[in-house]
Amino acid sequence: MRTYVAVDLGATSGRVIAGRVEGGRLVTEETARFANVPVSVPGPGGRSTLHWDVLRLWAGVQDGLAAAARRFGPVTSVGIDGWAVDHGLLDVDGALLGNPVHYRDARTVGAPARLFEQISPERHHALTGVQVQPFNTVFQLVAAAGTAQLGAARRALLVPDLLACWLTGEHVAELTNASTTGLLDVTTRAWSAEVAGAASAVTGVDVGALLPRLVAPGSVVGTVRPEVGAALGVTGAPVVAVGSHDTASAVVAMPLGGRDAAWISSGTWSLVGLELDTPVLTAASRAANFTNELGVHGTVRFLRNVTGLWLLEQALATWAGQGRPQELEPLLGQAAAVPGLRCVVDVDDPVLAAPGDVPARVAELARSTGQPVPHEPAEVVRVLLDSLALAHARAVRQAAELAGRDVAVVHLVGGGSRNALLCRLTADATGLPVEAGPAEGTATGNLLVQAAAGGDVGDDLAAMRAVVRASTQVRRYDPSGDRAAWERAEETLRDRSSSPGPRGS
C-alpha cells in the first residue's frame, strides 16, 4: 500500500502528515507538528527585520519525514505546501543568502508605488490578475533594491520550493504559488517578461534571471538526494509538485458539488472566493482588490484575502502575556453567549495588521467609532468573530457579482471549520448554508494530488473530491439569525470604512 507524505506549513505552525488511500477513503496520520515562530533581527540603522526561522522549519520537516518512514516503511512520494509570496534568495553556489523575510515586515511600505512608476497598476493587473498587497513577491524584491543580498542573488525560490530544493537539489517554481508573486502572466501561465522588466528597472538587477522554471501540480520535481535522505529513510523518494500554495491544496479538498458554491479557506488568513475556468481581469475586479490565482488542473482561484483567525491567535497571545491565559473552547462558548453585533470592526484595517495587542486595538477602534467598547475576553472574541463573518459575507457577495455567478452554498475548510461559532455566524452573515470540513483541508489536498500522481486516485478534481466526501464528516450550518441586523451592521461598517477617521491611522 502506497504511503504519501504531506508537508504542510502554516503561518504559525507546520505539520507532516502521512496518508494512504484505503477503500476509496483517505486515511491520515500526523507524524510531526512544530511551531513556526517569526524572529525579529536587528539590522543596519537600528531597524529590525522580521524573518521566518526557515532552519527550524527544515528541522521539523526532516523529523516528520523520518517518523513517517519509521511508521509506514518506504515513502511513495513527498509534497510540500505553504503560504505564498515569501522566498529565499540563493547565491551563485546555490546557498541561501539569509532567512526569508516575513510578509508582515514593514519594509514593503511604499514598494507598490515604486513599481507602478515603471508599469501602471492597470497594466500590472491585466497581466497578472493579482490583488495589490504590499507583501507580494514583486514588491518584496522592489523593497530589497540596493541591498547586498539582492545584488548577490542568482535565484529566488518561494518557501515550499526552497525546501523542495534542499530535498532534491532542483530549482523550480510550482505554478499555483508562482501565480501569487505578481510576476506571472495569469493568462499565458508563464513568467511575465514585462513585469520582470519593470521590477528590474527599479531594483537594478535582472529579476527575470532570478525566476526558476515553472512546474505544474502533479509533476515530479526530483528525488530525495542520498546525502539528505539516508538519515531519514526516504532516499530516492519522488518529491511531487502539489498545489504548493496552501490555498490551492485546500481548494482541492473542498467537496464542491457544482458551480454555485463559494469557498472559504479559514486559518491565519481567510481566503474567500470561487473556482473558475478563466480569470476575471475587469476594472471592477481590480477596484475591488480581488486576485486571480491559478489552481490545480487548470482552474483559477478568484478570491480576496481577508485577515482571519490570526487576530484571535494574537488576542490569545496577548492575554497569556498579561498573565491571564484563556482556554479557547470555553472562551468560544462564553463568546456565543455575548449579544452579537454590538460592535464590529474592519478586520482588514491596517491598525490590526501588525503583531501585538489586538484587544487594545479593537477597543480603540470601538471607542473612536462610538461603539460599545469590549473589555472582557469573551466580548473581544465576539467582536472579532462577528467582524470576520461580516468580512466573509462581503467577499462572497463581491466575488459572485464580479464573476457573474449565483452562490447557493459556502464550503469552509481549514482550522476555522472546527470553530462552530464562526461557522454559524458566517452562515448568518451570508444568509447561506455553510458546509464545514475537512479541518486539515490543505494537507488533504496535498495528499490527493500525490495520490493521483501515484495512480491511487483518478487524475481529475471530481475523483479527488469524491475521496474527500467519502473521508470527511461535513457539518452543515443553516442561517438562523436576524438578516436585517447583519445587513445594518454591514452598512454601518461600510459607512465607517469610507469616512475619515482612525482607519490606517
Image: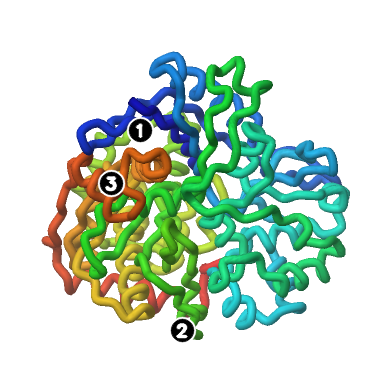
| Residue under pointer 1 | 326
The quarter of the displayed image where residue 470 is located:
top left
| Residue under pointer 3 | 417
Q: Secondary structure at mark 2?
A: helix
Q: Secondary structure at mark 3?
A: helix
Q: Position of residue 309 (x, y in %)?
A: 40, 48
Q: Quadrant of the C terminus?
A: bottom right
Horizontal side, residue 223 vs residue 266: left or right: right
Spatial distance from mark 1 to mark 2, Cα to Cα?
Answer: 43 Å
The outermost residue toward the front is 455
Q: Which residue is at a point 61% across and 82% down the rendered structure image?
A: 122
| Residue under pointer 2 | 284
Q: Quadrant of the N terminus?
A: top left
Q: Nearer the viewer, residue 4 or 252?
A: 4
Up the image or down, 62 lies above or below 306; here it is: above
Q: Which residue is at a point 14% across and 67% down the rendered structure image?
A: 482
Q: Is tag 1's residue or tag 2's residue first in the polypeptide sequence?
A: 2
Q: Position of residue 273 (x, y in %)?
A: 37, 65
